Image (cartoon, rainbow, N blue to C red):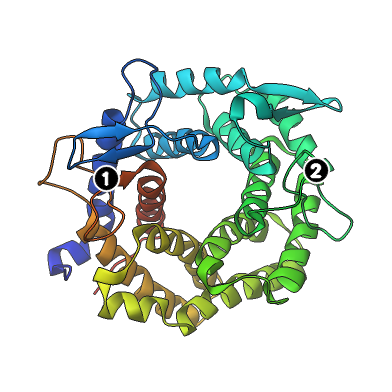
Amino acid sequence: MKLSASANSKMSDLLRERVALVFNWYQGMENGETGMLEYLYIPQADRFVRENCPIRDIASVWDAELIGEFLNKHELQPMIEKSLHHFDEYLTEREGHLILDSSPLGESSSIAHSAFMILALLYAPPARRKKEIAGLAEEILQQQRADGSYKVCFADLPDHGEELYAGEAMLALMEVHRQLGDARFLQSVEHGFAYYDACYFRGGRVGDDLLVFFANWQSQACRLLFECTANAVLKRNVARYIFAMHDRIVDRGFYGDMERHPERQVSVEVACALEGLNDAYSIARSLKDERADRYRHFICTGLEYLLELQCTDTGTAKERGGFGVSLSERAQRIDITGHAASAFIKGAENGIECG
């Protein structure tokens, strides 16, 4: 699909229209009995599939809040309140702070569960539960090691998912610092950034198959670090780190392959790559870095793919507004649609135009 000239001149309007379709899709994903969101929709069978994925369940509440805030729409508020009340019941004390209890989660409680609970609480309409937010954030601080890394599981288990979960935790801590104010959370992310840059990314611990996901969450957290710190040297180092991650994605042919072979792409990879690249673009543009034009071009490449992938006027009524797994696979996961909507929102906020 090639974007028309009229679409190019009003890309932000087009993206807003598509986010509005996503909002309608979220309304269709509500379970009539529980009042909470379903995880997977199979259009061919016109049915939902429930899977135990609490990290994504909590994160999807945050996604819904961000979409509603962007559109200034409130129809999802009952679902948000029902979901937050449900997960409130999972909160339990640990050494004077808070985590989500592993037993109702059905899996080991981790910094990722806490991170998304923090984000969902922060973006919920007033009154924000500052006590719960602070309790969850404090326990993430306790998970940080002397080298700056974060232990993932609260139980005495080996780390897993560090490529995603550390960045998610850092993003939550930055949002706590930005919205509620506490320099300790900023300092924790500064320490974490130094580790995940030097020891994890440059240390060769991020495989090609996970690079777009690692870069996405690290970029989201570090963009806030870049914006919040007054340390000029740290700003330069954070920008260098973000640029290095996305330059590696570009140099390894991710966007070139997308342009040549869109049929081969997996939508969650495209959406996550685009979320992080929008943050890299925002920083490059603010610094007047020459990368900005190149990043904008590849953002347009990703938008072209996602705009074509999104179901608009075909398929079942519940399918419209969502995103399939690929151009050939119509199954719609709520996390994929959340990432794609976020990419659209960031593109609109960045004033991206595609020619």
Q: How far from the left and from the top, in percent, is residue 149?
A: 78, 57
In this view of the protein, which residue sits in the foreground, 329 or 137? 329
**Callout 2: SS:** helix
Q: Name the kind of residue labelled 1 in the image.
A: Gly
Residue where numbered disc 2 is placed = 141
Image quadrant containing the N terminus = bottom left
Which residue is situated farthest in the left direction here?
314
In this view of the protein, which residue sits in the foreground, 176 or 33? 33
Q: How far from the left and from the top, in percent, is residue 314?
A: 10, 46
Q: Name the kind of residue labelled 2 in the image.
A: Leu
Q: Could you give the CA–CA distance between mark 1 and mark 2, rounded to whole angstroms?
A: 36 Å
**Callout 1: SS:** loop
Q: How far from the left and from the top, in percent, is residue 289?
A: 53, 79
Image quadrant containing the C terminus = bottom left
Judge left or right: residue 28 versus residue 120: left
In this view of the protein, which residue sits in the foreground, 275 or 289? 275
Judge left or right: residue 253 versus residue 216: left
**In which image quadrant can residue 298 be found?**
bottom left
Circle 2 residues within 10 Å: few <14, some 14–19, many ≥20: some
Residue where numbered disc 1 is placed = 322
Q: Earlier in the sequence, mark 1 or mark 2?
A: 2
In this orientation, does residue 37 appear?
A: yes
